[in-house]
Image: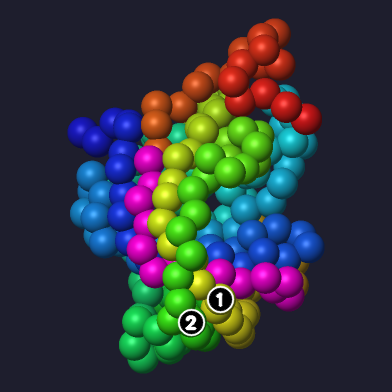
Amino acid sequence: MTPPPWTLTGRGLIALSASGVLMLVRYASSPVGPYDELLWAELTRTPAGWRPQVQAIVVSTEESVVWGRRNWGIPKHLARFDWLGQERWGEVRVSGEDGAEVARLGYEVGTWRVPVRTGLLPPPLRTLAQPGLDGAGGWLLTPLEASGRVTPARLTVGHLRGLTPTPPPVRPLLTLGVPDFRLVFPVPQPLNTGRHEKTATSGG
């Protein structure tokens, strides 16, 4: 069993658009081992107020699927990631379990680094709000803690039409490479709708 909290390390890219955030991540270590991830998240009105919510996500291992869904209500699905190129530039093709192409992206990452941490963000913007999955009701709030270094980057979206639900057209306004990071997923907080405005993660 791999219950929370989880501490993960790795590298990735974050593309911010007017409609949401696209993230491409290679986890080097986690409680379920290394795995790859592609996700789309949007700022959504939830019973806790406006919070980021993962709308569509695929990962490369079954263990990540099972425990991501069970621990935090993250709607993960299994996919295969084929990487071409090098750490700083290249292309990734993501395929579903049926072999159909889910997404295709190109990337290029800069060289200089600036340290960052999620503590610089207001609590509501770093707290995931996810509805319960697989028969679980209610909502789960997960305040994330992360630190690392960022650099200018470019993420070219060939397509995302295999993600479910399919994101709107992604035109990045800002793309950051994250050459190394440490991320903590804590035990989630079940949402008590009568008290959420008084919690540390309240807002909106």
Marks 1 and 2, how far apart in space? 5 Å
Q: Quadrant of the C terminus?
A: top right
Q: Find the magenta span and give its range.
A: 170-184
Residue drawn at the location 44% of the way across and 81% of the way down:
111
The overriding secondary structure of the stretch rendered in magenta is strand
Residue 126 visible here: yes
Q: Is residue 51 above or below residue 10?
A: above
Upstream in the sequence, badge 1 or badge 2? Answer: 2
What's under tag 2, amino acid-wise? Gly
Residue, disc 2: 110
Q: Identify the residue shown where x is 65% and y is 37%.
A: 122
How many numbered marks does the figure carry?
2
* Residue 133 lies in the magenta-colored region: no
Helix, strand or loop under label 2:
loop
Find residue 182 and report its horizontal and vertical position in percent: 35, 51
Residue hosting label 1: 152
- The residue under the point 32% across, 31% down is 4
Please provide percent x and percent y for residue 201: 61, 25
Colour style of the rendered protein structure = rainbow
- Disc 1 crowd rating (10 Å Cα; few below 14, some 14-19, many 20+) is some
- Residue at position x 76%, y 60% in the image: 19
Q: Which of the pair 33/55 is nearer the observer?
A: 33
As helix, strand or loop, the secondary structure at mark 1 comes to: strand
